[in-house]
Image (cartoon, grey):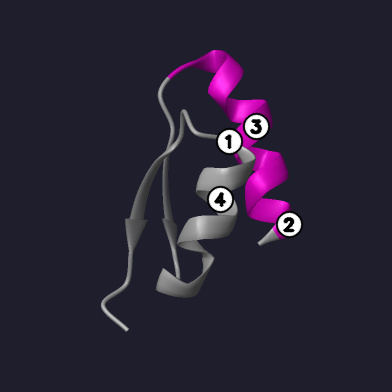
Amino acid sequence: MGSVCLLSKVVIKSGLVTTFIPKCGYNILQTFILEVMVLTDQN
């Protein structure tokens, strides 16, 4: 999740970002950077 958070933070500067992550990482990413749209798996 750390690499996803850091990459999303860098890429958000160039525009809109959507990430696909496991459901367990949703709170981590949304706490770190609110501007990123998140898609999660069903599990």
Residue beneath disc 4: 29
Residue beneath disc 1: 33
Front residue (pair 26, 2) = 26
Mark 4, secondary structure of its residue: helix
Answer with mark 2 or mark 1, whichever residue precedes in sequence.
Answer: 2
The answer to which quarter of the image holds residue 37 is top left
CB under 8 Å between callouts 3 and 1?
Answer: yes
**Taking 39 as reference, is 11 above or below it?**
above
Please tell me whether the stretch drawn in magenta is mainly helix, strand or loop.
helix
6 drawn magenta: yes
Q: Quote the CA–CA distance across marks 2 and 4.
A: 9 Å
8 drawn magenta: yes
The answer to which quarter of the image holds residue 40 is bottom left
CB under 8 Å between callouts 1 and 4?
Answer: yes
Answer with mark 3 or mark 1, whichever residue precedes in sequence.
Answer: 3
Within 10 Å of the Cα at label 1, are there few (<14), some (14-19), or many (20+) other Cα atoms?
A: some
Residue beneath disc 3: 9
| Magenta segment | 2-15
Answer with mark 4 or mark 3, whichever residue precedes in sequence.
Answer: 3
Amino acid at circle 2: Gly
Residue in the picture at 46% in, 28% down: 35
Quadrant containing the N terminus is: bottom right
Residue 12 image point, x, y percent: 55, 24
